[in-house]
Image (cartoon, grey):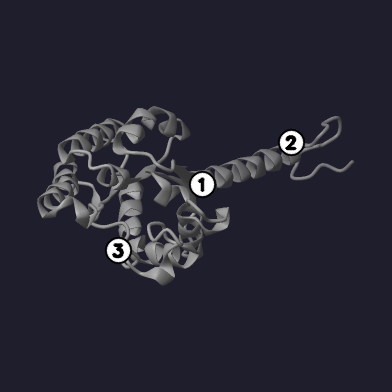
Amino acid sequence: MSPLYGISWRGINPPWYLLACGIIVASLISGFSSDVVARQIKLLALGDSLTAGYGLAKPDGFTEQLQRALRAEGEEIVVINAGVSGDTSAGGHARLGWALADKPDAVILELGANDGLRGIEPEVTGSNLNAILTELDSHGIPVLLAGMLAPPNLGREYGREFEAVFTRLSKAHEVVFYPFFLDGVVGMPGLNLADGMHPNKEGVAVLVQRILPSVRELLERVSN
């Protein structure tokens, strides 16, 4: 065998240049895979029936519609549904450790609606939500806090105190704040199920479109 560039390949199996090429290609593939994984963000939605998708087929729920909307914009997002129907702020706090086992990069916190329905003291709701936010702070996880309004039958004073809980906590913890999760849907028969309390498929679509700018702001905090 004639030498190439003064080097004889006789007795060398496989040739060194094939090994070198293989190593380079493997490194490139490994680096590409790492980049793809790094760009995929896990967004945890911790909430109640509004997050869980009560009364809806799975593809029509909030987390699923939000994930599709974000992916349509080119975001590599996995939205994790950590909604439990009937859950209060206390329930959400109790299962926070379990929810964080998924190691989310960011959290949408949507709790409080059932506190209002049960007439739980706003001070108690605030304490539970504060505990959740404090725990998320300790993990360095950015949060979008979704506010809620109390049912009008509980009176104006209760309503003011309840609403103020979310505003106060959003400032104290410097989170992304979306003042009212059901904005644009509440009181609209065509956008709710027969119970008048939970959004239907079309109602969820409205929720997602309205909250999207706040979710984008949340994701910017992840990348930064």
Instruction: Tell me, yes or no, if residue 39 can be seen here.
Output: no
Residue identified by numbered label 1: 35
Q: Amino acid at mark 1?
A: Asp
Q: Amino acid at mark 2?
A: Trp
Task: First in sequence, mark 3 or 1: give its number.
Answer: 1
Q: Secondary structure at mark 1?
A: helix
Residue identified by numbered label 3: 183
**Label 3 – label 1 distance at C-alpha:** 37 Å
Residue 92: x, y in percent?
Answer: 35, 35
Determine whether, in the image, residue 149 is placed left or right of residue 218: left
Q: Amino acid at mark 3?
A: Asp
Q: Secondary structure at mark 2?
A: helix
Give the number of the mark in front: 2 or 1. 1
Q: Is residue 48 above or below residue 192?
A: above
Marks 2/1 in contact by CB < 8 Å: the verdict is no
Residue identified by numbered label 2: 16
Depth check: 142 or 51 in front?
51
